[in-house]
Amino acid sequence: MSSRTFAPLLAAMLLLAGPAQAQLTIEIIGGGANQIPIAVLPFAGESVLPQSITEIIEQDLSRSGRFRAIFVGGVSPLPTEIAQVNFPEWKSRLADAIVIGQAQRLADGKLEVRFRLLDVLKQSQIGGVAFTLTAAQTRLTAHKIADFIYEKMTGERGVFSTRIAYIVKQGPRHELRVADADGQNAQSILISSEPIMSPAWSPDGTRMAYVSFQNKKPILFVQNLSASKQPAPVANYRGSNSAPAWSPDGKQLAAVLTKDGTSQIYLMSADGTNLRRLTVSQGIDTEPFFTPDGQSIYFTSDRGGSPQIYRMPASGGEPVRMTFEGDYNVSPRVSPDGKILAYISRVSGRFQLMAMDLESKQVQTLTDGQRDESPSFAPNGRIILYATDVDNRGVLAAVSSDGRFKQRLGIQAADVREPSWGPFLGN
Amino acid sequence: MKKTLFSALTLALVYGCASTPVETEKPAAPSAQPAQGLPVSPPLAARPIQPAQVDLSKRSVFYEYDKYDIKDEYRPVLQVHGKYLAENRGKKMLIQGNCDERGSREYNIALGQRRAEGVKRMLVLMGATESQVEPVSLGEEKPRCADHNEGCWSQNRRSDMLYSGEY
Protein backbone atom coordinates (compact mmCIF):
# COMPACT_ATOMS: atom_id res chain seq x y z
CA MET A 1 0.00 0.00 0.00
CA SER A 2 2.83 2.39 0.66
CA SER A 3 3.58 2.67 -3.04
CA ARG A 4 0.13 4.19 -3.48
CA THR A 5 0.91 7.07 -1.20
CA PHE A 6 2.71 9.50 -3.46
CA ALA A 7 2.32 7.80 -6.81
CA PRO A 8 2.77 10.95 -8.93
CA LEU A 9 6.28 11.45 -7.60
CA LEU A 10 7.43 7.86 -7.91
CA ALA A 11 8.29 5.72 -10.88
CA ALA A 12 5.37 3.34 -11.04
CA MET A 13 6.47 -0.05 -12.32
CA LEU A 14 3.59 -2.06 -13.65
CA LEU A 15 4.54 -5.68 -13.99
CA LEU A 16 1.32 -7.52 -14.60
CA ALA A 17 1.29 -10.46 -16.99
CA GLY A 18 -0.25 -10.23 -20.47
CA PRO A 19 -0.10 -11.96 -23.83
CA ALA A 20 2.65 -9.80 -25.35
CA GLN A 21 6.15 -10.66 -24.14
CA ALA A 22 7.31 -7.46 -22.50
CA GLN A 23 5.05 -4.80 -21.05
CA LEU A 24 5.47 -1.09 -21.24
CA THR A 25 6.54 0.37 -17.93
CA ILE A 26 5.64 3.91 -17.02
CA GLU A 27 7.78 6.55 -15.43
CA ILE A 28 6.33 9.90 -14.46
CA ILE A 29 8.73 12.77 -15.01
CA GLY A 30 7.03 16.06 -14.24
CA GLY A 31 4.17 17.15 -12.05
CA GLY A 32 1.01 18.91 -13.19
CA ALA A 33 -0.43 22.03 -11.66
CA ASN A 34 -3.72 22.30 -9.75
CA GLN A 35 -3.98 18.59 -9.07
CA ILE A 36 -7.18 17.43 -7.42
CA PRO A 37 -6.44 15.62 -4.14
CA ILE A 38 -8.42 12.38 -4.15
CA ALA A 39 -8.54 9.39 -1.80
CA VAL A 40 -9.28 6.06 -3.50
CA LEU A 41 -10.04 3.66 -0.67
CA PRO A 42 -9.62 -0.07 -1.21
CA PHE A 43 -13.00 -1.57 -2.09
CA ALA A 44 -14.44 -3.89 0.54
CA GLY A 45 -14.03 -7.48 -0.69
CA GLU A 46 -11.89 -6.56 -3.68
CA SER A 47 -9.69 -9.61 -3.09
CA VAL A 48 -12.27 -11.63 -5.08
CA LEU A 49 -10.83 -9.87 -8.14
CA PRO A 50 -7.61 -11.08 -9.80
CA GLN A 51 -6.02 -7.65 -9.38
CA SER A 52 -6.37 -4.76 -6.96
CA ILE A 53 -8.92 -2.71 -8.86
CA THR A 54 -8.45 0.38 -6.70
CA GLU A 55 -4.71 0.35 -7.33
CA ILE A 56 -5.37 0.52 -11.10
CA ILE A 57 -7.92 3.31 -10.61
CA GLU A 58 -5.50 5.30 -8.48
CA GLN A 59 -2.62 4.82 -10.92
CA ASP A 60 -4.82 5.93 -13.83
CA LEU A 61 -5.84 9.10 -12.01
CA SER A 62 -2.29 9.90 -10.86
CA ARG A 63 -0.80 9.33 -14.31
CA SER A 64 -3.24 11.76 -15.89
CA GLY A 65 -1.44 14.56 -14.06
CA ARG A 66 -4.79 15.98 -12.95
CA PHE A 67 -5.06 14.17 -9.61
CA ARG A 68 -2.96 13.71 -6.50
CA ALA A 69 -3.51 10.49 -4.55
CA ILE A 70 -4.09 10.96 -0.83
CA PHE A 71 -2.80 8.43 1.69
CA VAL A 72 -5.58 5.96 2.46
CA GLY A 73 -3.92 3.74 5.07
CA GLY A 74 -5.37 2.87 8.44
CA VAL A 75 -9.06 2.81 7.55
CA SER A 76 -10.98 -0.04 9.15
CA PRO A 77 -13.58 -1.16 8.48
CA LEU A 78 -13.69 -0.03 4.85
CA PRO A 79 -16.80 2.10 4.21
CA THR A 80 -19.18 0.97 1.47
CA GLU A 81 -21.98 3.47 2.06
CA ILE A 82 -21.89 7.26 2.43
CA ALA A 83 -23.19 7.00 6.03
CA GLN A 84 -20.10 5.02 7.01
CA VAL A 85 -17.63 7.68 5.82
CA ASN A 86 -15.79 9.78 8.41
CA PHE A 87 -15.77 13.04 6.40
CA PRO A 88 -13.89 15.20 8.98
CA GLU A 89 -11.07 12.65 8.85
CA TRP A 90 -10.78 13.01 5.03
CA LYS A 91 -11.02 16.75 5.29
CA SER A 92 -8.07 16.73 7.69
CA ARG A 93 -6.17 14.55 5.19
CA LEU A 94 -6.85 17.32 2.61
CA ALA A 95 -8.88 15.19 0.23
CA ASP A 96 -11.38 16.98 -2.01
CA ALA A 97 -12.97 13.74 -3.10
CA ILE A 98 -13.10 10.17 -1.87
CA VAL A 99 -13.91 6.95 -3.69
CA ILE A 100 -15.46 3.99 -1.84
CA GLY A 101 -16.83 0.72 -3.09
CA GLN A 102 -17.17 -2.99 -2.80
CA ALA A 103 -16.64 -6.10 -4.88
CA GLN A 104 -18.38 -9.44 -4.58
CA ARG A 105 -18.96 -12.71 -6.37
CA LEU A 106 -22.54 -13.14 -7.53
CA ALA A 107 -24.54 -16.36 -7.36
CA ASP A 108 -24.03 -17.02 -11.09
CA GLY A 109 -20.23 -16.84 -10.67
CA LYS A 110 -19.92 -13.39 -12.21
CA LEU A 111 -18.42 -10.53 -10.28
CA GLU A 112 -19.93 -7.25 -9.23
CA VAL A 113 -18.09 -4.02 -8.51
CA ARG A 114 -19.95 -0.97 -7.25
CA PHE A 115 -18.42 2.35 -6.29
CA ARG A 116 -19.36 5.85 -5.16
CA LEU A 117 -17.52 9.10 -5.74
CA LEU A 118 -18.06 11.46 -2.80
CA ASP A 119 -17.52 15.18 -2.31
CA VAL A 120 -15.67 15.63 1.00
CA LEU A 121 -16.63 19.26 1.62
CA LYS A 122 -20.31 18.84 0.74
CA GLN A 123 -20.41 15.36 2.31
CA SER A 124 -22.50 14.22 -0.62
CA GLN A 125 -22.40 11.73 -3.47
CA ILE A 126 -21.18 13.01 -6.84
CA GLY A 127 -21.96 9.77 -8.62
CA GLY A 128 -21.81 6.02 -8.48
CA VAL A 129 -22.05 2.98 -10.78
CA ALA A 130 -22.38 -0.79 -10.37
CA PHE A 131 -20.69 -3.11 -12.91
CA THR A 132 -21.21 -6.79 -13.56
CA LEU A 133 -18.05 -8.30 -15.00
CA THR A 134 -15.92 -11.37 -15.59
CA ALA A 135 -12.53 -11.68 -13.89
CA ALA A 136 -10.83 -10.86 -17.21
CA GLN A 137 -12.67 -7.53 -17.31
CA THR A 138 -11.17 -6.26 -14.06
CA ARG A 139 -8.70 -3.89 -15.71
CA LEU A 140 -11.30 -2.57 -18.14
CA THR A 141 -13.70 -1.96 -15.25
CA ALA A 142 -10.99 -0.10 -13.33
CA HIS A 143 -10.34 2.11 -16.38
CA LYS A 144 -14.09 2.76 -16.78
CA ILE A 145 -14.34 3.81 -13.12
CA ALA A 146 -11.29 6.08 -13.52
CA ASP A 147 -12.93 7.59 -16.64
CA PHE A 148 -16.11 8.25 -14.64
CA ILE A 149 -14.19 9.94 -11.82
CA TYR A 150 -12.06 11.95 -14.25
CA GLU A 151 -15.08 13.26 -16.12
CA LYS A 152 -17.02 14.16 -12.97
CA MET A 153 -14.07 16.00 -11.43
CA THR A 154 -12.56 17.75 -14.49
CA GLY A 155 -15.56 18.13 -16.80
CA GLU A 156 -13.68 16.36 -19.61
CA ARG A 157 -13.88 12.81 -20.86
CA GLY A 158 -11.28 10.39 -19.50
CA VAL A 159 -9.12 8.27 -21.81
CA PHE A 160 -8.18 5.46 -19.43
CA SER A 161 -10.33 2.86 -21.19
CA THR A 162 -9.01 3.78 -24.65
CA ARG A 163 -6.22 1.89 -26.38
CA ILE A 164 -2.90 2.78 -27.96
CA ALA A 165 -0.97 1.19 -30.83
CA TYR A 166 2.80 1.28 -31.27
CA ILE A 167 5.69 -0.52 -32.95
CA VAL A 168 8.21 -2.58 -30.99
CA LYS A 169 11.54 -3.44 -32.59
CA GLN A 170 13.66 -6.06 -30.90
CA GLY A 171 16.61 -7.19 -33.01
CA PRO A 172 15.20 -8.24 -36.39
CA ARG A 173 11.69 -8.64 -34.98
CA HIS A 174 9.12 -5.92 -35.67
CA GLU A 175 5.80 -5.99 -33.91
CA LEU A 176 2.65 -3.90 -34.15
CA ARG A 177 0.99 -3.93 -30.75
CA VAL A 178 -2.22 -2.64 -29.26
CA ALA A 179 -2.38 -2.02 -25.50
CA ASP A 180 -4.50 -0.29 -22.89
CA ALA A 181 -3.73 3.43 -22.57
CA ASP A 182 -1.56 2.60 -19.53
CA GLY A 183 0.58 0.24 -21.62
CA GLN A 184 -0.83 -2.92 -20.04
CA ASN A 185 -2.73 -5.77 -21.64
CA ALA A 186 -0.65 -5.58 -24.85
CA GLN A 187 -1.56 -7.75 -27.82
CA SER A 188 0.34 -8.33 -31.05
CA ILE A 189 -1.50 -7.36 -34.20
CA LEU A 190 1.33 -8.21 -36.59
CA ILE A 191 4.80 -9.68 -36.24
CA SER A 192 7.28 -9.36 -39.09
CA SER A 193 10.98 -9.69 -39.82
CA GLU A 194 10.65 -6.55 -41.93
CA PRO A 195 9.79 -3.04 -40.68
CA ILE A 196 6.23 -1.95 -39.88
CA MET A 197 5.36 1.75 -39.91
CA SER A 198 2.71 4.40 -39.41
CA PRO A 199 -0.12 2.62 -37.58
CA ALA A 200 -3.37 4.61 -37.80
CA TRP A 201 -6.63 3.70 -36.04
CA SER A 202 -9.89 3.87 -37.92
CA PRO A 203 -12.18 6.39 -36.21
CA ASP A 204 -14.41 3.58 -34.88
CA GLY A 205 -11.43 1.68 -33.45
CA THR A 206 -12.14 -1.53 -35.37
CA ARG A 207 -9.42 -1.33 -38.03
CA MET A 208 -5.78 -0.36 -38.25
CA ALA A 209 -4.02 1.03 -41.31
CA TYR A 210 -0.26 0.52 -41.43
CA VAL A 211 2.73 0.25 -43.73
CA SER A 212 4.57 -3.06 -44.04
CA PHE A 213 7.91 -3.76 -45.74
CA GLN A 214 7.39 -7.50 -45.95
CA ASN A 215 7.63 -7.31 -49.76
CA LYS A 216 10.86 -5.28 -49.60
CA LYS A 217 9.09 -1.97 -50.12
CA PRO A 218 6.44 0.04 -48.31
CA ILE A 219 2.93 -1.30 -48.96
CA LEU A 220 -0.26 -0.12 -47.29
CA PHE A 221 -2.60 -2.46 -45.39
CA VAL A 222 -5.83 -2.06 -43.46
CA GLN A 223 -6.35 -4.83 -40.92
CA ASN A 224 -9.57 -5.64 -39.14
CA LEU A 225 -8.56 -5.91 -35.48
CA SER A 226 -10.98 -8.76 -34.82
CA ALA A 227 -9.60 -10.80 -37.74
CA SER A 228 -6.65 -13.08 -37.20
CA LYS A 229 -5.29 -13.17 -40.73
CA GLN A 230 -3.29 -10.57 -42.59
CA PRO A 231 -5.44 -8.76 -45.12
CA ALA A 232 -4.77 -7.97 -48.78
CA PRO A 233 -3.01 -4.63 -49.38
CA VAL A 234 -5.14 -1.54 -49.99
CA ALA A 235 -2.33 0.24 -51.87
CA ASN A 236 0.48 -1.66 -53.56
CA TYR A 237 1.47 0.55 -56.46
CA ARG A 238 4.79 0.90 -58.18
CA GLY A 239 7.24 2.66 -55.88
CA SER A 240 6.32 3.41 -52.24
CA ASN A 241 2.91 3.38 -50.53
CA SER A 242 2.77 5.01 -47.10
CA ALA A 243 1.49 7.63 -44.64
CA PRO A 244 -2.14 6.47 -44.18
CA ALA A 245 -4.64 8.87 -42.57
CA TRP A 246 -8.34 8.21 -41.98
CA SER A 247 -11.11 10.62 -42.80
CA PRO A 248 -13.19 11.30 -39.66
CA ASP A 249 -16.13 9.29 -41.06
CA GLY A 250 -13.86 6.25 -41.53
CA LYS A 251 -14.86 5.88 -45.17
CA GLN A 252 -11.73 7.24 -46.81
CA LEU A 253 -7.99 7.04 -46.50
CA ALA A 254 -5.51 9.66 -47.54
CA ALA A 255 -2.12 8.14 -48.32
CA VAL A 256 1.12 8.90 -50.11
CA LEU A 257 1.92 7.11 -53.37
CA THR A 258 4.78 7.54 -55.83
CA LYS A 259 3.24 5.81 -58.82
CA ASP A 260 3.28 9.07 -60.79
CA GLY A 261 6.73 10.30 -59.69
CA THR A 262 7.60 11.95 -56.39
CA SER A 263 5.61 11.37 -53.19
CA GLN A 264 2.12 12.81 -53.63
CA ILE A 265 -1.08 12.64 -51.60
CA TYR A 266 -3.99 10.56 -52.88
CA LEU A 267 -7.46 9.85 -51.55
CA MET A 268 -9.08 6.41 -51.72
CA SER A 269 -11.94 4.45 -50.22
CA ALA A 270 -10.95 2.46 -47.14
CA ASP A 271 -10.72 -0.69 -49.30
CA GLY A 272 -8.31 1.01 -51.70
CA THR A 273 -10.78 1.64 -54.54
CA ASN A 274 -11.79 5.03 -56.05
CA LEU A 275 -8.24 6.32 -56.07
CA ARG A 276 -7.69 9.96 -56.93
CA ARG A 277 -4.79 12.33 -56.66
CA LEU A 278 -5.08 15.30 -54.27
CA THR A 279 -1.76 17.15 -54.61
CA VAL A 280 0.16 18.09 -57.73
CA SER A 281 3.67 19.30 -57.02
CA GLN A 282 7.16 18.64 -58.30
CA GLY A 283 8.42 17.99 -54.79
CA ILE A 284 7.51 15.93 -51.74
CA ASP A 285 3.98 15.99 -50.34
CA THR A 286 3.47 13.62 -47.43
CA GLU A 287 2.05 13.02 -43.92
CA PRO A 288 -1.60 13.90 -44.60
CA PHE A 289 -3.83 14.39 -41.55
CA PHE A 290 -7.55 15.23 -41.64
CA THR A 291 -9.03 17.98 -39.50
CA PRO A 292 -11.76 16.64 -37.15
CA ASP A 293 -14.50 18.23 -39.30
CA GLY A 294 -13.19 16.36 -42.35
CA GLN A 295 -13.02 19.59 -44.34
CA SER A 296 -9.24 20.04 -44.57
CA ILE A 297 -6.03 18.05 -44.73
CA TYR A 298 -2.79 19.17 -43.14
CA PHE A 299 0.38 17.81 -44.74
CA THR A 300 4.14 18.21 -45.05
CA SER A 301 5.63 19.54 -48.29
CA ASP A 302 9.04 20.73 -49.46
CA ARG A 303 7.49 22.80 -52.27
CA GLY A 304 8.87 25.97 -50.69
CA GLY A 305 12.43 24.64 -50.53
CA SER A 306 12.31 23.04 -47.08
CA PRO A 307 9.79 20.74 -45.38
CA GLN A 308 6.94 22.85 -43.98
CA ILE A 309 3.36 22.24 -42.96
CA TYR A 310 0.48 23.20 -45.25
CA ARG A 311 -3.31 22.95 -45.17
CA MET A 312 -5.54 22.27 -48.15
CA PRO A 313 -9.23 21.46 -48.71
CA ALA A 314 -9.92 17.72 -48.27
CA SER A 315 -11.02 17.61 -51.90
CA GLY A 316 -7.66 19.01 -53.00
CA GLY A 317 -6.94 22.57 -54.06
CA GLU A 318 -4.65 25.43 -53.24
CA PRO A 319 -2.61 24.79 -50.06
CA VAL A 320 -1.95 27.42 -47.41
CA ARG A 321 1.42 27.38 -45.65
CA MET A 322 1.11 27.08 -41.86
CA THR A 323 4.70 27.07 -40.52
CA PHE A 324 7.37 29.69 -41.16
CA GLU A 325 9.87 29.39 -38.30
CA GLY A 326 12.87 27.18 -39.07
CA ASP A 327 13.67 24.95 -42.04
CA TYR A 328 12.21 21.62 -40.92
CA ASN A 329 8.61 21.38 -39.72
CA VAL A 330 6.95 18.00 -40.18
CA SER A 331 4.35 15.46 -38.90
CA PRO A 332 1.26 17.67 -38.46
CA ARG A 333 -1.52 16.37 -36.15
CA VAL A 334 -4.63 18.35 -35.26
CA SER A 335 -6.22 18.09 -31.79
CA PRO A 336 -9.67 16.47 -31.59
CA ASP A 337 -11.28 19.89 -30.95
CA GLY A 338 -9.50 21.30 -34.02
CA LYS A 339 -7.82 24.07 -32.04
CA ILE A 340 -4.20 22.91 -31.73
CA LEU A 341 -1.73 21.83 -34.40
CA ALA A 342 1.00 19.59 -32.96
CA TYR A 343 4.07 19.01 -35.12
CA ILE A 344 7.79 18.29 -34.98
CA SER A 345 10.30 21.07 -35.56
CA ARG A 346 14.06 20.90 -35.96
CA VAL A 347 15.60 23.48 -33.67
CA SER A 348 19.43 23.69 -33.61
CA GLY A 349 19.69 20.09 -34.79
CA ARG A 350 17.19 18.80 -32.21
CA PHE A 351 13.75 17.50 -33.07
CA GLN A 352 11.10 18.80 -30.70
CA LEU A 353 7.35 18.68 -30.30
CA MET A 354 5.59 21.99 -30.90
CA ALA A 355 1.98 23.07 -30.39
CA MET A 356 0.45 25.88 -32.45
CA ASP A 357 -2.74 27.57 -31.32
CA LEU A 358 -4.54 27.64 -34.66
CA GLU A 359 -6.49 30.78 -33.79
CA SER A 360 -3.66 32.99 -32.49
CA LYS A 361 -0.91 31.14 -34.43
CA GLN A 362 1.18 31.20 -31.26
CA VAL A 363 3.66 28.35 -31.00
CA GLN A 364 4.75 26.62 -27.79
CA THR A 365 7.66 24.18 -27.52
CA LEU A 366 6.37 21.19 -25.54
CA THR A 367 9.45 18.97 -25.30
CA ASP A 368 13.21 19.26 -25.03
CA GLY A 369 14.35 15.93 -26.49
CA GLN A 370 16.92 15.23 -29.19
CA ARG A 371 14.76 13.06 -31.41
CA ASP A 372 11.11 13.53 -30.61
CA GLU A 373 8.77 12.29 -33.34
CA SER A 374 5.38 10.81 -34.31
CA PRO A 375 2.98 12.83 -32.10
CA SER A 376 -0.52 11.48 -31.45
CA PHE A 377 -3.30 13.22 -29.51
CA ALA A 378 -5.33 11.39 -26.88
CA PRO A 379 -9.00 11.44 -27.95
CA ASN A 380 -9.78 14.04 -25.26
CA GLY A 381 -6.95 16.27 -26.53
CA ARG A 382 -5.33 16.61 -23.09
CA ILE A 383 -2.25 14.49 -23.74
CA ILE A 384 0.07 14.05 -26.72
CA LEU A 385 1.84 10.73 -27.00
CA TYR A 386 5.09 10.77 -29.00
CA ALA A 387 8.26 8.79 -29.62
CA THR A 388 11.62 9.83 -28.25
CA ASP A 389 14.82 8.14 -27.20
CA VAL A 390 16.63 7.62 -23.92
CA ASP A 391 20.24 6.40 -24.08
CA ASN A 392 19.73 5.62 -27.78
CA ARG A 393 16.75 3.39 -27.07
CA GLY A 394 13.34 4.25 -28.46
CA VAL A 395 10.67 4.93 -25.85
CA LEU A 396 7.24 6.50 -25.86
CA ALA A 397 6.58 9.67 -23.97
CA ALA A 398 3.48 11.63 -23.14
CA VAL A 399 3.11 15.33 -22.45
CA SER A 400 0.01 17.25 -21.46
CA SER A 401 -0.98 19.62 -24.24
CA ASP A 402 -0.06 22.55 -21.96
CA GLY A 403 3.45 21.07 -21.67
CA ARG A 404 3.35 20.78 -17.87
CA PHE A 405 3.08 17.06 -17.24
CA LYS A 406 5.36 14.44 -18.76
CA GLN A 407 5.78 10.70 -18.56
CA ARG A 408 7.69 7.94 -20.35
CA LEU A 409 6.69 4.46 -21.42
CA GLY A 410 9.44 2.01 -22.30
CA ILE A 411 10.22 -1.66 -22.68
CA GLN A 412 13.51 -3.17 -21.51
CA ALA A 413 15.94 -3.96 -24.33
CA ALA A 414 13.56 -3.00 -27.13
CA ASP A 415 12.84 0.04 -29.26
CA VAL A 416 9.31 1.35 -28.92
CA ARG A 417 8.18 3.82 -31.56
CA GLU A 418 5.35 5.33 -33.59
CA PRO A 419 2.56 5.57 -31.06
CA SER A 420 -0.99 6.06 -32.24
CA TRP A 421 -3.72 6.77 -29.70
CA GLY A 422 -7.02 5.08 -30.47
CA PRO A 423 -10.48 6.65 -30.35
CA PHE A 424 -13.10 6.66 -27.60
CA LEU A 425 -14.98 3.37 -27.71
CA GLY A 426 -18.66 2.79 -27.06
CA ASN A 427 -21.16 5.07 -25.31
CA MET B 1 36.27 -2.23 -87.47
CA LYS B 2 39.33 -0.57 -86.05
CA LYS B 3 37.37 2.60 -85.54
CA THR B 4 34.75 0.79 -83.52
CA LEU B 5 37.37 -0.85 -81.41
CA PHE B 6 39.11 2.48 -80.88
CA SER B 7 36.01 4.34 -79.81
CA ALA B 8 35.00 1.53 -77.52
CA LEU B 9 38.39 1.67 -75.86
CA THR B 10 38.15 5.44 -75.60
CA LEU B 11 34.79 5.14 -73.88
CA ALA B 12 36.21 2.65 -71.46
CA LEU B 13 39.10 4.98 -70.72
CA VAL B 14 36.93 8.06 -70.38
CA TYR B 15 34.62 6.40 -67.87
CA GLY B 16 37.45 4.91 -65.93
CA CYS B 17 36.24 1.37 -66.02
CA ALA B 18 35.93 -1.20 -68.77
CA SER B 19 32.24 -0.88 -69.27
CA THR B 20 32.10 -1.77 -72.96
CA PRO B 21 32.69 -5.29 -74.16
CA VAL B 22 35.57 -5.31 -76.67
CA GLU B 23 34.65 -7.08 -79.86
CA THR B 24 36.48 -10.26 -80.62
CA GLU B 25 39.17 -9.81 -83.26
CA LYS B 26 38.83 -12.19 -86.18
CA PRO B 27 41.91 -13.67 -87.88
CA ALA B 28 43.04 -11.27 -90.62
CA ALA B 29 42.87 -12.68 -94.12
CA PRO B 30 46.29 -12.86 -95.82
CA SER B 31 46.48 -10.11 -98.39
CA ALA B 32 48.99 -11.63 -100.74
CA GLN B 33 50.30 -15.00 -101.85
CA PRO B 34 53.83 -15.74 -100.76
CA ALA B 35 56.32 -15.40 -103.66
CA GLN B 36 57.58 -18.59 -105.17
CA GLY B 37 60.72 -19.95 -103.56
CA LEU B 38 60.49 -17.83 -100.46
CA PRO B 39 60.14 -19.72 -97.19
CA VAL B 40 56.49 -20.12 -96.23
CA SER B 41 55.71 -18.29 -93.03
CA PRO B 42 53.87 -20.30 -90.42
CA PRO B 43 50.11 -19.68 -90.36
CA LEU B 44 49.10 -16.72 -88.23
CA ALA B 45 47.99 -17.72 -84.81
CA ALA B 46 44.91 -15.81 -83.80
CA ARG B 47 43.11 -16.03 -80.52
CA PRO B 48 39.87 -14.41 -79.47
CA ILE B 49 40.03 -11.58 -76.95
CA GLN B 50 37.53 -12.08 -74.15
CA PRO B 51 34.99 -9.31 -73.80
CA ALA B 52 35.99 -7.00 -70.95
CA GLN B 53 34.10 -7.84 -67.76
CA VAL B 54 31.35 -5.34 -67.07
CA ASP B 55 31.89 -4.23 -63.50
CA LEU B 56 28.46 -4.21 -61.91
CA SER B 57 29.84 -4.57 -58.40
CA LYS B 58 29.40 -0.95 -57.40
CA ARG B 59 25.78 -0.62 -56.36
CA SER B 60 25.46 2.39 -54.10
CA VAL B 61 25.15 6.15 -54.31
CA PHE B 62 25.71 8.21 -51.15
CA TYR B 63 24.21 11.60 -50.28
CA GLU B 64 24.64 14.67 -48.14
CA TYR B 65 22.25 15.23 -45.20
CA ASP B 66 18.76 16.24 -46.34
CA LYS B 67 19.89 16.12 -50.00
CA TYR B 68 18.93 13.94 -52.93
CA ASP B 69 21.12 15.28 -55.74
CA ILE B 70 23.60 12.77 -57.18
CA LYS B 71 27.23 13.78 -56.86
CA ASP B 72 29.37 13.67 -60.03
CA GLU B 73 31.57 10.92 -58.64
CA TYR B 74 28.66 8.43 -58.98
CA ARG B 75 28.02 9.10 -62.69
CA PRO B 76 30.46 6.40 -63.93
CA VAL B 77 28.79 3.79 -61.68
CA LEU B 78 25.35 4.72 -62.99
CA GLN B 79 26.72 4.74 -66.56
CA VAL B 80 27.76 1.10 -66.19
CA HIS B 81 24.37 0.00 -64.88
CA GLY B 82 22.42 2.12 -67.36
CA LYS B 83 24.31 0.61 -70.26
CA TYR B 84 23.99 -2.90 -68.85
CA LEU B 85 20.22 -2.48 -68.53
CA ALA B 86 20.08 -1.07 -72.06
CA GLU B 87 21.90 -4.11 -73.38
CA ASN B 88 19.94 -6.55 -71.25
CA ARG B 89 16.30 -5.57 -71.65
CA GLY B 90 15.17 -8.63 -69.72
CA LYS B 91 16.95 -7.45 -66.58
CA LYS B 92 14.97 -5.62 -63.91
CA MET B 93 16.26 -3.48 -61.10
CA LEU B 94 14.91 -2.32 -57.73
CA ILE B 95 16.42 0.92 -56.45
CA GLN B 96 16.10 1.32 -52.70
CA GLY B 97 16.49 4.84 -51.33
CA ASN B 98 17.59 5.15 -47.69
CA CYS B 99 17.95 7.94 -45.16
CA ASP B 100 19.69 8.47 -41.86
CA GLU B 101 17.58 8.21 -38.73
CA ARG B 102 17.09 11.92 -38.15
CA GLY B 103 13.71 13.49 -38.75
CA SER B 104 10.22 12.21 -39.50
CA ARG B 105 9.92 8.56 -40.53
CA GLU B 106 7.34 9.31 -43.19
CA TYR B 107 9.21 12.32 -44.49
CA ASN B 108 12.25 10.08 -44.74
CA ILE B 109 10.22 7.62 -46.82
CA ALA B 110 9.54 10.50 -49.21
CA LEU B 111 13.17 11.66 -49.15
CA GLY B 112 14.44 8.10 -49.78
CA GLN B 113 11.97 7.84 -52.64
CA ARG B 114 13.33 11.05 -54.10
CA ARG B 115 16.86 9.66 -53.91
CA ALA B 116 15.83 6.41 -55.61
CA GLU B 117 13.83 8.34 -58.21
CA GLY B 118 16.93 10.41 -59.02
CA VAL B 119 18.95 7.26 -59.63
CA LYS B 120 16.19 5.88 -61.83
CA ARG B 121 16.12 9.03 -63.95
CA MET B 122 19.87 8.88 -64.46
CA LEU B 123 19.72 5.22 -65.47
CA VAL B 124 16.96 5.97 -67.96
CA LEU B 125 19.06 8.79 -69.44
CA MET B 126 21.84 6.27 -69.85
CA GLY B 127 19.74 3.76 -71.72
CA ALA B 128 17.53 1.84 -69.29
CA THR B 129 13.78 1.85 -69.85
CA GLU B 130 11.22 3.06 -67.29
CA SER B 131 9.74 -0.42 -66.94
CA GLN B 132 13.11 -1.97 -66.06
CA VAL B 133 13.73 0.07 -62.90
CA GLU B 134 11.45 0.55 -59.89
CA PRO B 135 12.51 3.17 -57.37
CA VAL B 136 11.25 2.47 -53.84
CA SER B 137 12.07 3.86 -50.43
CA LEU B 138 13.11 2.20 -47.21
CA GLY B 139 13.29 5.57 -45.45
CA GLU B 140 15.21 5.21 -42.20
CA GLU B 141 13.74 1.76 -41.53
CA LYS B 142 16.62 -0.45 -42.72
CA PRO B 143 19.85 1.21 -41.58
CA ARG B 144 23.08 -0.47 -42.70
CA CYS B 145 24.86 1.03 -39.71
CA ALA B 146 23.13 1.29 -36.34
CA ASP B 147 25.18 3.84 -34.39
CA HIS B 148 23.95 7.35 -33.80
CA ASN B 149 26.72 9.47 -35.32
CA GLU B 150 27.73 11.00 -38.64
CA GLY B 151 30.05 8.06 -39.41
CA CYS B 152 26.99 5.86 -39.51
CA TRP B 153 24.54 8.37 -40.88
CA SER B 154 26.69 9.00 -43.97
CA GLN B 155 26.55 5.26 -44.78
CA ASN B 156 22.80 5.19 -44.33
CA ARG B 157 22.08 8.11 -46.70
CA ARG B 158 22.21 5.86 -49.71
CA SER B 159 20.53 4.41 -52.77
CA ASP B 160 21.18 0.75 -53.55
CA MET B 161 20.68 -0.87 -56.94
CA LEU B 162 19.51 -4.48 -56.83
CA TYR B 163 18.90 -6.73 -59.84
CA SER B 164 16.01 -9.16 -59.91
CA GLY B 165 16.88 -12.19 -57.87
CA GLU B 166 18.82 -10.08 -55.41
CA TYR B 167 15.90 -8.78 -53.36
Image (cartoon, coloured by chain):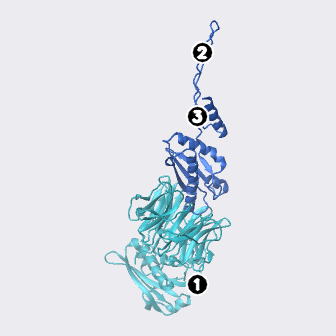
Chain colours: A cyan, B blue
Q: Secondary structure at mark 1?
A: loop
On the image, which quarter does residue B44 sit in? Answer: top right
Q: Of the residues under marks 2 and 3, which one precedes in the sequence?
A: 3
Q: Which of labels 1 and 2 is toward the front?
A: 2
Q: Which residue is mark 3?
A: B21
Instruction: Give the camera-side residue of B84 and A395.
Output: B84
Instruction: Give the camera-side residue of A418 and B65.
Output: B65
Q: CA distance from mark 1 to mark 2?
A: 106 Å
| Whole-percent x, y for residue A48 in the image | 40, 75
**Amino acid under disc 1:** Asn
**Amino acid under disc 2:** Pro
The lab-note entry on whether marks 1 and 2 share a chain reads no
Q: Which of labels 3 and 1 is toward the front?
A: 3
Given contact means CB atoms under 8 Å apart, are the residues at marks 3 and 1 in contact?
no
| Whole-percent x, y for residue A31 in the image | 60, 78
The chain containing the residue under callout 1 comes to: A
Instruction: Give the camera-side residue of B7 and B85.
Output: B7
Q: Which residue is mark 2?
A: B43
Task: Indicate which disc residue B101 carries.
Answer: none
Residue A396 seen in this snapshot: no
The chain containing the residue under callout 2 comes to: B
Q: CA distance from mark 3 to mark 1?
A: 79 Å
| Whole-percent x, y for residue A40 in the image | 49, 82
Instruction: Give the camera-side residue of B151 and B147.
Output: B151
The lab-note entry on whether marks 3 and 1 share a chain reads no
**Where is B16 relative to A373, above or below?**
above
**Where is B167 relative to A177, above or below?**
above
Q: Secondary structure at mark 3?
A: loop
Left or right, B67 with respect to A285, comes to: right
On the image, which quarter does residue B21 sit in? Answer: top right
Q: Which residue is mark 1?
A: A34
Residue B80 seen in this snapshot: yes
